[in-house]
């Protein structure tokens, strides 16, 4: 047996069970050993019935005081009731549909019961379907694994136990001994054995420390290498003329100082020895597009092509309109490529790009990355960067074109994390809003106010302004079409019968969406009813009101993004959050929204309020999925692993040394996940 042995050859597995393990992403015995428990049953800490916490898992040692009694309930099912005591307290246990209970629980014998204590309707303490074992079977901490309908946690536990018998053949510690000593880490085999079957909480902590370290270490190694690779890219597109000034002069507004600074930082990069690799971070509405435009213009004047990549078609099409305006009186030629560009047209456009007839290519990510040959690609701008994986930043660079890279993001993140996620980039921050902006007023109301909200919308429309309604959400995975359509049909045939109302949703074809957005931009549509497809980047300054239905379904950062669709011009804007939810969390979010419009503050609050894996899901930052480490809470190990990674790479940049071979393999494995 070795680390590549198929899981099905493990004793007790076989092909049917192997298929279930495959569903959990486990294909080898090695992968099973790295399938860490999601939680533990702590049978080692026994509490008295009197002290048992309510509604939390705990373990109680008690004697069965009466033989189990059988009760028949609806549907021919049976349940058993058992009462137990620990000398001081009494506890009632209920088991459903388990006919073996009378054989397993004997009167006057001692057992350990593991479950949640609750109070029954008459105020008696009870546990529903607790796990149990004989008291003399020894107290320990038992693993709980993610299960499927056909694979229980207990089965996985048995298989892991079996696999651990072969641990010496399977697991080789990739970290050199000196490192373990230096960073106070236990050997990998010990960590793996203990993470599954810890002898006590202290050994579990030691095991977790080692495994979390390993994961973060690999992550940092990969990111630092990425950074070094990017930093080393020679500048093959050196600017010879800085033309940003003449472009800025032609703009209908005065740029903020932050915008001017960002432009000159980028221009200086592009004129330097290494290719630019820069993040432009700025809250919604801070004017990132104008910065990108100045650079694209400059690149074009220097004979280079640029690509602008957007996460959605709607956004790509909006960018096309924006840039057509911005470049109206210039010689910059623009092409658009999206998934819905027709085949024949696509061929022509691609031809124009490879002939160098287009200076700027705007499009969705996949399209530009996959099938476009450029004549002289000098600059790649990625909008809403946080939607893409870290690896994607370099895809075009790897095509051999080595363009300058500017990524733009409105997601503010804490500093330590920024260092890690964007550690490979130089950063420009737009910390200043255009002067003409007025703060968007935000209110929170219940559904009872709908009539008043509709009147408020009418007032806006009557005065020539425009408005959004963000539709009620449907549950995840369901199509957003039906409720959006129904809502649209109802409103446009009743309250807003005399107004021009439009509908935008995710199931529309790109060209349809584009038509709707164009009509909205031209004020042919006054009221746009939309699903969350408008979340990213839509820019119509004449829209001064946004109503968000079912606001409780959105996270803070998402609400902030949505609100950013208004307040983009000189008119005073309003955001109305509609919700009938009585949830405390939701109310807290609304409260914060009403109090502040500062994106960084909101992101901070968002982090505090949400659990990890939400904002920090790999969808948000594009990093590889982590199994055991948390970017949010494992701060100490995050810094430690960064130091360790830095030291190792300083000594052996390519990880070529014999004793670093396994580390290299692991880093490559972590960064080869399909999600990044
Ligand atoms: P974001 O940073 O969210 O992408 P945009 O680039 O879409 O923001 O800019 C928001 C709006 O502000 C646009 O309508 C843009 O024309 C306008 N704008 C950008 N910079 C300025 C400025 N310095 N003064 C006034 N308006 C500006
Ligand atoms: Mg934008």
Image (cartoon, rainbow, N blue to C red):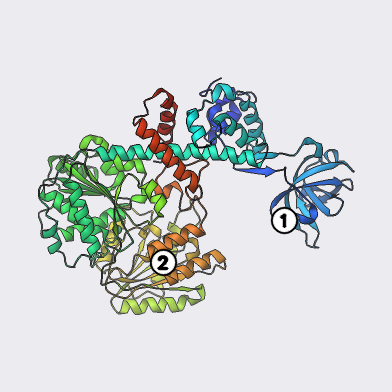
Question: Is residue 186 shown above or below 54?
Answer: above
Residue 324 percent across, percent down from the top left: 17, 58
The numbered mark at residue 508 is none
Residue situated in front as seen by the camera: 625 or 635:
635
Q: Can residue 390 be seen in this view?
A: yes
Quadrant in which the C terminus is drawn? top left
Question: Is residue 258 shown above or below 29?
Answer: below
Disc 2 element? helix
The numbered mark at residue 489 is 2
Q: Can residue 550 be seen in this view?
A: no
Q: Which residue is drawn at 60% across and 36% down?
A: 195
Quadrant of the image occupied by residue 273: top left
Q: How far apart are marks 2 and 1 (CA)?
A: 52 Å
Q: In which quarter of the image is ligand 2?
A: bottom left
Question: Is residue 344 shown above or below 49?
Answer: above
| Residues at marks 2 and 1 touching, judged by CB atoms closer than 8 Å | no
Q: Extreme top residue here?
A: 1
- Specify few, some or many for label 2: CA neighbours under 10 Å numbering under 14, 14-19, or 20 or more: some
Return the disc, 2 or 1, that comes first in the chain's sequence: 1
Q: In this view, does 379 lie to the left or right of 646?
A: left
Disc 1 element? loop
Residue situated in front as seen by the camera: 284 or 455:
284
Residue 347 percent across, percent down from the top left: 19, 41
Q: Name the residue under label 1.
A: 53
Residue situated in front as seen by the camera: 15 or 618:
618
Quadrant in which the N terminus is drawn? top right
Residue 668 percent across, percent down from the top left: 40, 32
- Specify few, some or many for label 1: CA neighbours under 10 Å numbering under 14, 14-19, or 20 or more: some
Residue 129 percent across, percent down from the top left: 75, 47
């Amino acid at each position: 047996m070795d680390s590549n042995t198929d899981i099905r050859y493990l004793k007790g597995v076989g092909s049917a069970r192997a298929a279930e393990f495959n569903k959990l992403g486990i294909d080898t015995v090695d992968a099973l050993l790295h399938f860490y428990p999601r939680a533990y049953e702590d049978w080692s800490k026994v509490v008295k019935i009197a002290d048992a916490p309510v509604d939390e898992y705990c373990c109680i040692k008690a004697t069965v005081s009466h033989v189990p009694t059988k009760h028949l309930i609806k549907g021919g099912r049976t349940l058993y009731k058992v009462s137990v005591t620990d000398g001081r307290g009494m506890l009632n246990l209920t088991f459903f549909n388990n006919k073996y209970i009378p054989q397993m629980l004997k009167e006057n014998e001692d057992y350990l019961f593991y479950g949640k204590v609750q109070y029954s309707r008459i105020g008696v303490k009870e546990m529903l379907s607790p796990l149990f074992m004989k008291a003399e079977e020894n107290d320990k901490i038992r693993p709980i694994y993610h299960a499927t309908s056909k694979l229980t946690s207990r089965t996985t536990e048995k298989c892991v136990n079996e696999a651990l018998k072969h641990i010496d053949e399977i697991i080789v510690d990739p970290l050199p001994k000196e490192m373990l000593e230096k960073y106070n880490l236990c050997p990998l085999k010990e960590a793996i054995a203990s993470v599954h079957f810890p002898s006590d909480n202290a050994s579990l902590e030691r095991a977790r420390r080692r495994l979390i370290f390993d994961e973060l270490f690999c992550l940092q190694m990969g990111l630092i290498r990425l950074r070094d690779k990017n930093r080393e890219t020679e500048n093959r597109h050196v600017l010879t003329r800085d033309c940003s000034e003449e472009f800025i002069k032609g703009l209908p507004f005065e740029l903020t100082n932050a915008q001017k600074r960002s432009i000159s930082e980028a221009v200086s990069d592009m004129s330097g020895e290494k290719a630019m690799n820069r993040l432009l971070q700025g809250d919604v509405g801070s004017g990132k597009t104008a910065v990108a435009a100045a650079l694209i213009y400059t690149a074009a004047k220097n004979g280079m092509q640029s690509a602008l990549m957007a996460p959605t078609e709607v956004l790509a099409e909006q960018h096309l309109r924006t840039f057509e305006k911005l470049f109206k009186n210039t010689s910059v030629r623009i092409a658009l490529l999206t998934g819905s560009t027709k085949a024949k047209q696509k061929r022509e456009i691609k031809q124009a790009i490879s002939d160098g007839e287009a200076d700027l290519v705007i499009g969705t990510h996949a399209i530009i990355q996959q099938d476009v040959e450029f004549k002289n690609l000098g600059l790649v701008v990625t909008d809403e960067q946080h939607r893409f994986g870290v690896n994607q930043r370099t895809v075009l660079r790897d095509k051999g074109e080595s363009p300058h890279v500017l990524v733009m993001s409105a997601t503010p993140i804490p500093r330590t994390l920024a260092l890690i996620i964007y550690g490979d980039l130089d950063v420009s921050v737009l910390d200043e809003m255009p002067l003409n902006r007025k703060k968007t007023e935000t209110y929170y109301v219940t559904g009872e106010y709908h009539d008043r909200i509709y009147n408020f919308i009418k007032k806006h429309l009557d005065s020539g302004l425009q408005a959004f309604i963000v539709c009620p959400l449907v549950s995840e995975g369901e199509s957003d079409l039906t409720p959006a359509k129904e809502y649209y049909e109802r409103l446009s045939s009743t309250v807003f019968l005399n107004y021009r109302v439009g509908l935008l949703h995710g199931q529309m074809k790109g060209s349809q969406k584009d038509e709707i957005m164009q009509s909205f931009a031209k004020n042919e549509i006054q009221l746009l009813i939309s699903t969350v497809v408008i979340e990213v980047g839509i820019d119509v300054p004449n829209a001064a009101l946004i109503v968000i239905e079912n606001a409780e379904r959105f996270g803070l950062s998402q609400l902030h993004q949505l609100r950013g669709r208004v307040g983009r011009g000189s008119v005073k804007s309003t955001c109305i959050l509609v919700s009938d939810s009585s949830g405390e969390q939701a109310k807290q979010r609304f409260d914060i929204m009403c109090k502040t419009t500062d994106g960084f503050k909101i992101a901070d609050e968002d982090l505090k309020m949400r659990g990890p894996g939400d904002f920090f899901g790999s969808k948000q930052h594009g990093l590889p999925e982590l199994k055991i480490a948390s970017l949010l809470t494992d701060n100490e190990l995050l810094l430690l692993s960064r130091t360790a990674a830095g030291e190792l790479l300083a000594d052996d940049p390519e990880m070529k040394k014999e004793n670093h071979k396994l580390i290299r393999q692991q880093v490559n494995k972590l960064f080869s996940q399909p999600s990044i």
